Image (cartoon, rainbow, N blue to C red):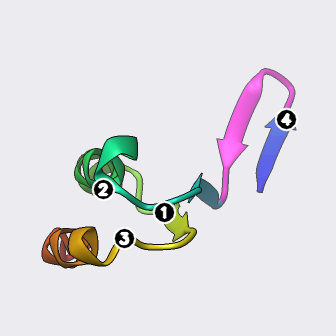
Amino acid sequence: MINNIGNKLTVKNLIILFMGRISPIKGPDLLIEAFALLIKKHKNINLILAGPWEEKFLAKIKFLQYPF
C-alpha cells in the first residue's frame, strides 16, 4: 500500500511482480539478484514470480534463493 500524505510518500508494503514465462531470455535471475540487494535496505518489499517455468531453468532459479 502506498500512501501520499502531503509531499511525503510512504510505502507500507511494496510488491514487485514478474508475470510471464519464467525463462532465461526474460532475465528473472537478474531480477532476483537485484532484489537481494534491494531487500537489504527496504525490508517491506516482496517479490512475486508468476508464470509457467522452463524446467531446465528452474534449478538455477532455486539456486539463487537468498536468505532475505
Q: Is residue 22 above or below residue 5?
A: below
Numbered mark located on residue 47 in the image: 1
Dot 2: element:
helix
The residue pinned by badge 4 equals 5
Q: Residues within 10 Å of mark 4 (few under 14, many from 20)?
A: few
Q: Is residue 65 magenta?
A: no
- Gap in Å between the C-alphas at discs 4 and 1? 25 Å
Dot 3: element:
loop
Q: Which residue lies at the image location 22% right of the left edge and 51% below the top edge?
A: 33
Numbered mark located on residue 58 in the image: none
Residue type indicated by callout 2: Ile
Residue type indicated by callout 3: Glu
The residue pinned by badge 3 equals 54
> Comparing marks 3 and 1, which lies closer to the viewer?
3
The residue pinned by badge 2 equals 32
Q: Position of residue 58 (x, y in %)?
A: 27, 75
Q: Which residues are magenta?
A: 5-12
Q: Residues within 10 Å of mark 2 (few under 14, many from 20)?
A: some
Mark nearer the N terminus (4 vs 1): 4
Q: Which quadrant of the view contains residue 6?
A: top right
Dot 4: element:
strand
Question: Could you tell whether 11 is left or right of 28 in the image?
Answer: right
Mark nearer the N terminus (3 vs 2): 2
Residue type indicated by callout 4: Ile
